[in-house]
Amino acid sequence: MGNTFGKMFRVTTFGESHNLAIGVIVDGCPAGLRLCEADIQKELDRRKPAQSSITTQRKEKDRVRILSGVFNGVTLGTPISMIVYNEDVNSKPYEEIKFKPRPNHADLSYYLKFGIYDYRGGGRASGRETLARVAAGAIAKKLLKERFGTIIVGHTIKIGKISAKKVNFEEIVKNAERNPVRCADLESAKLMEEEILKVKREGDSIGGIVEIVAVNVPAGLGEPVFDKLDADIAKAMMSIGAVKGVEIGLGFEFSEKRGSEINDEFYIENNSIKTYTNNSGGILGGISNGMPIVVRIAVKPTPSIAKEQRTVDLLRGKNVKIKITGRHDPCIVPRIVPVAEAMLALVLADHARRSGLIKDKL
């Protein structure tokens, strides 16, 4: 249970970090979408490890294979299954701590719920599970772009206490992929990278904030009152293991403002109703209004750090200390960008199917 996301564009992921493979089944993609493994691979390559000195050095090619749902380069309207085999697996560092749950990780909660947990790299709770989401999101992204011209991009806006300056959408598209931090403000990107390397040398980790923007989103997506578009976006983002907060539009800044400061006033342009500002982040009453959707997520520091920490020994029932070894990201923020983009794409594709804007065949 809990491994499937969406109602009409449904995604089910499977696999663990140190088992044979990670995979995903996408059900609800319409027939007629041109799709090949290269479409998926380009997104997986953005998420894969060992891309720079600020990421884990686990070396995985993350080569995807499409097993079903595509014939002659076109989707059939049947379930699309994809798989990526794990290659660079080293479970040895986890043997010494297999009965000692890592602080702030899911080890203990999985053990308390199931009475067993895969201690090797976090098992199902590992960030490696997100590659399945990115694979599915690649399909959703392509579907949305071909149907509506939707473009979804994410960028890092904060690492620790270092904040990027505000940039426009064009700058995000142009600059976010030009540095390992995925920050569209290139000057701040250098400072962020230095900060990540600093905490890495200290055997620690650091968190940050990612912003995701979707443009050319059709109006009318969202199903009030409990299936509001922003409610489903929040759930999608919070389902990413490292995310501990979500805001849409101005988010928590709304609490500091007056209505006269934040209300998005309307105007007509080319027979379309638009807003002069976009403080609501493209969603009103749980329904998209055609303006860009703006989402920000708070990403916690990676819990696996080299510093000595206090925990418990589940086998002996004693308080103990652990020092975690192995290969871990000192900052997961840059690698979470394509994951967050994928989750937003999945929500939008699902609601487009539910609203009838995307049919069973293109």
Image (cartoon, rainbow, N blue to C red):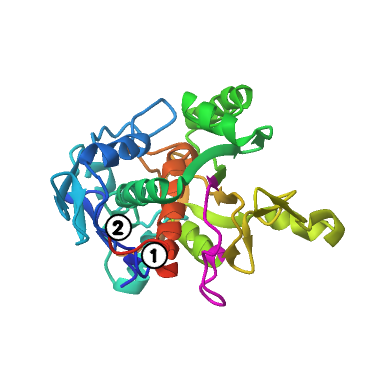
Q: Quadrant of residue 184?
A: top right
**Taken as a whole, is the magenta stretch helix, strand or loop?**
loop
Start and end of the magenta stretch?
A: 213-230
What amino acid is found at the position of numbered circle 2 in the picture?
Arg
Q: Quadrant of the C terminus?
A: bottom left
**Outermost bottom residue:** 225
| Residue 302 seen | no
Q: Quadrant of the N terminus?
A: bottom left
Q: Which mark is residue 353?
A: 1
Distance from the alpha carbon under mark 2 to that under mark 1: 29 Å
**Pointers 2 and 1 in contact (C-beta within 8 Å):** no
What amino acid is found at the position of numbered circle 1 in the picture?
Arg
Residue beneath disc 2: 124
Q: Nearer the viewer, residue 252 or 227?
A: 227
Element assignment for label 1: helix
**Residue 351: percent from left, percent from top:** 44, 64
**Residue 150: percent from left, percent from top:** 47, 46
Q: Which residue is drawn at the image coordinates 40% and 53% (left, top)?
A: 102
Mark 2 Cα shell of 10 Å, populated few (<14), some (14-19), many (≥20): many
**Residue 298: percent from left, percent from top:** 57, 50
Magenta stretch holds residue 214? yes
Mark earlier in primary sequence (2, 1): 2
| Residue 216 seen | yes
Element assignment for label 2: helix
Magenta stretch holds residue 93? no
Please determine whether, in this image, residue 145 is positioned above or below residue 76. Answer: above
Q: Which residue is drawn at the image coordinates 23% and 34% (left, top)?
A: 61
